[in-house]
Image (spheres, grey):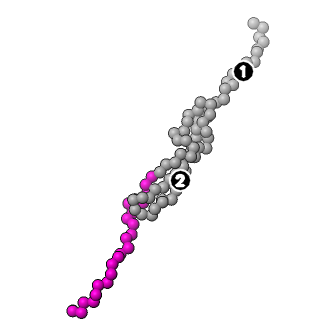
Amino acid sequence: DDGDTTPQSCNTDACPVDCEGEWEAWGSCSHTCGSNGQRHRTFDVSQFVAHGGVACDHADDDVDTEDCNTDIDCPVDCEGDWSAWNSQC
């Protein structure tokens, strides 16, 4: 052993990169009242998984949909005709 050192490469593999992302804000409801209202939001991946990192629970641009405004009854216009005058008091 003469004390000489020999350099050796180590840790040359790329580090794992975990996916990062979040749901965007909900869009507007498709109806202001009644049972057919729906709104949507989109999942936005800001960092894609790489080198064996942990994947996101959702894919980029996945769409989530939920019902909305279903508890609001739509107004109903009154319909009808006037009756004839009654001449008796």
Image-quadrant location for residue 4: top right
Asked whether, in this view, residue 49 is left or right of residue 72, the answer is right
Cα–Cα span, label 1 and label 2: 47 Å
**Principal SS element in the magenta part?**
loop
15 vs 73: above or below: above
Q: Which residue is drawn at 52% across and 56% down?
A: 27
Q: Residue tagged by mark 2? A: 25
Asked whether, in this view, residue 63 is left or right of residue 46, the answer is left
Towards the viewer: 25 or 29: 29
Image-quadrant location for residue 74: bottom left
42 vs 15: above or below: below
- Amino acid type of disc 2? Ala
Mark 2, secondary structure of its residue: loop
Asked whether, in this view, residue 11 is left or right of residue 82, the answer is right
Towards the viewer: 81 or 33: 81
Q: How many numbered discs, if any?
A: 2
Q: Do the residues labelled 1 and 2 touch (CB within 8 Å)?
A: no
> At which x and y percent is residue 7?
75, 18
Please tell me how crowded label 1 is: few (under 14), some (14-19), or many (20+) other residues with Cα within 10 Å. few
> At which x and y percent is residue 35?
39, 59
Please tell me how crowded label 2 is: few (under 14), some (14-19), or many (20+) other residues with Cα within 10 Å. few
Please indicate, yes or no, whether residue 79 appears anywhere in the rendered image.
Answer: yes
Mark 1, secondary structure of its residue: loop
Q: Residue at x 60, y 36 (%)?
A: 49
> At which x and y percent is residue 22?
55, 46
For the N terminus, give its image quadrant. Answer: top right
Q: Which of marks 1 and 2 is nearer the N terminus?
A: 1
Is residue 44 covered in magenta?
no
Instruction: Give the residues in magenta.
Output: 66-89
Is residue 87 covered in magenta?
yes
Q: Residue tagged by mark 1? A: 9
